[in-house]
Amino acid sequence: MRRVHGESGNALVEFTYLAVLLMIPLVYVLLTVFQVQRAAFAVTEAARQAGRAYATAETTAVGAARAQTAASIALEDQGLQLDGAPHITATAGVSPDSRITTTVQHRVTLPLLGGLFAGAVPPNIPVRATHVEHVDRFRQVP
């Protein structure tokens, strides 16, 4: 029996190892980017909906409660949980022709990296959105 001393067949093995070695980090990066993008869409919509709910309320207290509920629903639509209440500031309450600024923050947890490199790499990425809503100038004063 004669042994073959050439390199035939090694290209397939080398290609497979290189493909696996390069594809795993690429897939991880893509999944992380998709999670951050999903969170960005969610907090943008949550800030917008919170501002609209606050601006249409009769009082500041009712507006804050409605804004919290609207932000929670918008985040849950994208599969995210709200980290506490959204930060809501109102320049002049819900009086006619005032501006209401709503800010919603969320932290996207990095899969696997947070546990492995907890001291060297931050385990999450903060995502924040701000929305300014104008209260209707001709609304009825409560």
Image: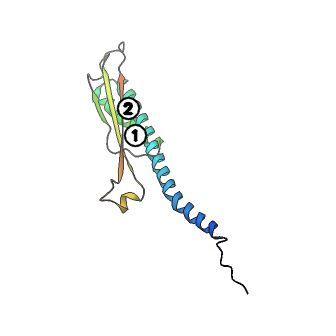
Q: Earlier in the sequence, mark 1 or mark 2?
A: 2
The residue lying furthest to the top in this view is: 138
State how the image is colored: rainbow
Along the viewing direction, whichever of 30 and 39 lies nearer the viewer: 30
Mark 1–mark 2 contact, CB under 8 Å? no
Q: Residue furthest left?
A: 92
Say which of 94 and 15 sits in front: 15
Residue lying farthest to the bottom in this orientation: 1
The answer to which image quadrant residue 12 occupies is bottom right
Task: Locate residue 126, reporting x and y percent.
Answer: 35, 44
Q: Is residue 35 left or right of residue 12?
A: left
> Label 1 to label 2, Cα distance in Å?
9 Å
In depth, the one of 22 and 71 nearer the eye is 22
Mark 2 = which residue? 50
The C terminus is located in which quarter?
top left
Residue 57 placement, left or right of 25? left
- Disc 2 marks a residue whose amino acid type is Ala
User: Based on the displayed image, in which of its 4 quarters is residue 104 positioned?
Assistant: top left
| Residue type marked 1 | Ser
> What is the number of the mark on residue 90?
none
- x%, y% of residue 96? 32, 16
Q: Which residue is mark 1?
A: 72
- Residue 65 spot, x, y in % from top left: 33, 34
The answer to whether residue 134 shows anywhere in this view is yes
Q: State the quadrant of the N terminus.
A: bottom right
